[in-house]
Image (cartoon, helix red, strand yellow):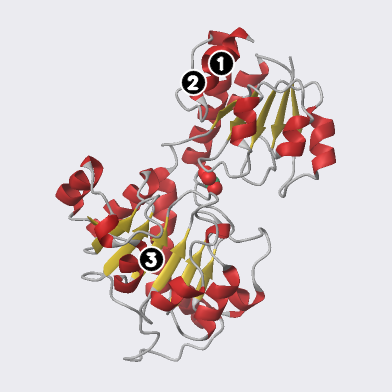
């Protein structure tokens, strides 16, 4: 058995995993071309991947030895999951361990935009500061405003907790709410708990967009959420709205976002993810009211270690201990997988 690992692992995790089987590492920051990935996958039973790696139909179909994909990320839009299940390939991800880090970054972007921290830093460094001015770099107050959280999974919830601490009123929409009106939304126990705990209210996406001074995206990228936020959605936001995206770039029509920024349809944006990473729309690069980060939502030393550990543990559970990893995305194939 052989393992292919895209990107390096922390030293201790490399040692733990290499006790199972020899590992070939490939360092890359963007997706390998399909033919290179296919060549590297020959004879490999396990691959460790990250969000940029394209485990598409062609690649999966050309990797006959592949038994497991361990994704070091919570999002898995880069993997053709239905095909993996069909081909009896286990797929795991790393939920739960990156919620705080990602929500911290989302909130940091929210603060950076509302208090113009990046502009302020450049202002001081470039020698423009001449002394205290009453109306210098005026920002936006947070307390008492409303945030709309798009996607109330673990990271959305971690964001909501931070927002509550800063005195924001919270409204949110959940996956499956797209296209539904407020009356068509069926409130469940999770919603009742969120209302009790955070006075958060579930609303339709349209109501959320119309009523939020801050909109923060935390849903998975799927067919249903691709370009979920486009021209129409930006036009519904109030002109003082600050837009934050730490989920996936393709959830947003980037041209529509650039237009919204340049025509002052919204006030500012904080972005950690982009449509076609590492490319950034040139209008967004030029806008002083846009704060940019290079997909670092989960990038704390502690969290990145925890993600590697969760991925390596899932591989060891499946191949060494023969116990079903709790973080499988296709747990339904486990019994068949064990027999194969
Ligand atoms: C990072 O982008 C993740 O999905 O964990």
Query: Which tag, 1 or 2, sits closer to the chain's start?
Result: 1
Q: Is mark 1 within 8 Å of ligand 1?
A: no
Residue 89 in the image: above or below residue 130: above
Q: CB atoms at circles 1 and 2 under 8 Å apart?
A: yes
Report whether 176 appears left or right of 4.
left
Which residue is tagged 3? 215
Callout 2: helix, strand or loop?
A: loop
The quadrant of the rendering that contains the N terminus is: top right
Q: Where residue 66 appears, x then y in whole percent?
A: 71, 23
- Are dots 2 and 3 in contact, CB under 8 Å? no
In the displayed structure, 204 sits above or below 281; it is: above
The residue beneath circle 2 is: 325
Q: Is mark 2 within 8 Å of ligand 1?
A: no
User: Mark 3: few, some, or many residues within 10 Å (few <14, many ≥20)?
Assistant: many
Task: Measuring from the top left, give residue 26's x and y in whole percent.
Answer: 76, 36
Residue at the front extreme? Answer: 184
222 relative position to 190: left or right: right
Residue placed at 67% from the left, 35% from the top?
8
Residue at screen point 54% across, 86% down: 127
332 or 93: which is nearer to us?
332
Mark nearer the N terminus (1 vs 3): 3
* Residue under the image location 80 percent in, 42 percent down: 34
Report the residue that reaches farthest toward the left: 196
The reply to whether the residue tagged 3 has its Cβ within 8 angstroms of ligand 1 is: no
Badge 3 element: strand
Residue of label 1: 318
């Amino acid at each position: 058995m052989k393992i292919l690992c895209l990107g390096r692992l922390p030293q201790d995790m490399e040692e733990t995993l290499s006790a199972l089987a020899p590992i070939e590492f490939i360092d890359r920051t963007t997706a390998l071309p399909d033919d290179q990935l296919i060549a590297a996958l020959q004879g490999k039973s396990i691959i460790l991947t990250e969000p940029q790696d394209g485990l598409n139909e062609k690649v999966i179909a050309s990797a006959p030895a592949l038994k497991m994909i361990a994704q070091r990320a919570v999002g898995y839009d880069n993997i053709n999951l239905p095909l993996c299940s069909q081909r009896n390939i286990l797929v795991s991800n790393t939920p739960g361990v990156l919620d705080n880090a990602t929500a911290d970054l989302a909130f940091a972007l929210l603060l950076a935009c509302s208090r113009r921290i990046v502009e302020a830093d450049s202002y001081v460094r470039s020698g423009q500061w001449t002394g205290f001015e009453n109306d210098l770099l005026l920002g936006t107050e947070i307390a008492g405003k409303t945030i709309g959280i798009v996607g109330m999974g673990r990271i959305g919830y971690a964001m909501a907790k931070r927002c509550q601490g800063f005195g924001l009123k919270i409204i949110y929409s959940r996956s499956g709410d797209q296209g539904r009106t407020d009356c068509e939304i069926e409130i469940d126990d999770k919603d009742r708990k969120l209302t009790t705990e955070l006075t958060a209210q579930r609303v339709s996406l349209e109501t959320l967009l119309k009523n939020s001074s801050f909109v923060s995206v935390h849903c998975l990228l799927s067919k249903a959420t691709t370009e979920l936020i486009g021209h129409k959605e930006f036009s519904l936001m109030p002109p003082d709205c600050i837009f934050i995206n730490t989920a996936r770039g393709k959830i947003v029509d980037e041209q529509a976002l650039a237009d919204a920024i340049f025509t002052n349809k919204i006030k500012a944006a904080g972005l950690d993810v982009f449509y076609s990473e590492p490319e950034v729309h040139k209008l967004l690069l030029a806008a002083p009211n846009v704060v940019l980060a290079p997909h670092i939502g989960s990038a704390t030393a502690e969290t990145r270690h925890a993600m590697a550990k969760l991925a390596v543990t899932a591989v060891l559970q499946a191949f060494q201990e023969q116990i079903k990893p709790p973080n499988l995305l296709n747990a339904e194939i486990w019994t068949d997988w064990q027999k194969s």
